[in-house]
Image (cartoon, grey):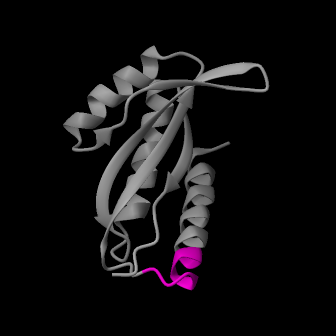
């Protein structure tokens, strides 16, 4: 799949999630804790991704191992704190897609909590 198609699909996901948040009463102008989720079959690429992400001012979580249906995999979150009303989330998700390609890991999207304040 061409990178343009990958980004288009991700941006559609972003818009859908933002719509769901708004429907739930979210205040997009409030700073949100956004967690970008990554996974890989091995720990090392996620550790390297985390180290680089620090230089981009993202806060990596601890890398941890999980198991699902007898498959083991590693996960890490890259955390930012941003407002969701200024388009920055789309810039961040595009960056995350490129980082995933560069570090040969999977980007599993982002999540946040509803902020009504």
Q: Main secondary structure of the magenta part?
A: helix
Residue drawn at (59%, 59%) of the image: 8
Q: In the rendered image of this protein, does residue 86 appear above or below residue 65?
A: below
Name the image quarter holding the C terminus: bottom left
Residue drawn at (46%, 60%) of the image: 112
| Front one among 103 and 30 | 30
Whether residue 112 is visible: yes
Kindly indicate the quadrant of the structure image that contains residue 11: bottom right
What x and y, as percent, mark residue 79?
A: 35, 47
Whether residue 97 is visible: no
Marks counted in the figure total 0
Q: In the rendered image of this protein, does residue 47 appear above or below residue 54?
A: above
Q: In the rendered image of this protein, does residue 72 appear above or below residue 21?
A: above
Kindly indicate the quadrant of the structure image that contains residue 53: top left
**Outermost residue toward the right in this view:** 69
Residue 21 lies in the magenta-colored region: yes
What x and y, as percent, mark residue 45?
A: 44, 20
Along the horizontal axis of the image, is 110 left or right of 33? right
Name the image quarter holding the N terminus: top right
In magenta, the rendered stretch is: 19-26
Residue drawn at (30%, 76%) of the image: 30
Along the horizontal axis of the image, is 94 left or right of 40? left
What x and y, as percent, mark residue 49?
A: 37, 28
Residue drawn at (31%, 52%) of the image: 80
Residue 84 lies in the magenta-colored region: no
């Amino acid at each position: 799949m061409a990178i343009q198609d990958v980004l288009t699909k991700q941006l559609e996901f972003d818009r859908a999630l933002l719509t769901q948040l708004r429907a739930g009463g979210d205040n997009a102008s409030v700073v949100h804790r956004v967690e970008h989720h990554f996974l890989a079959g091995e720990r090392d690429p996620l550790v390297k991704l985390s180290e680089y992400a620090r230089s981009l001012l993202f806060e990596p979580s601890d890398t941890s191992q999980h198991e699902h249906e007898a498959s083991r995999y590693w996960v890490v979150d890259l955390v930012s704190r941003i407002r969701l009303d200024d388009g920055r989330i789309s810039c961040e998700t595009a960056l995350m897609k490129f980082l995933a390609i560069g570090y040969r890991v999977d980007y599993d999207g982002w999540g946040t909590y509803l902020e009504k304040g």
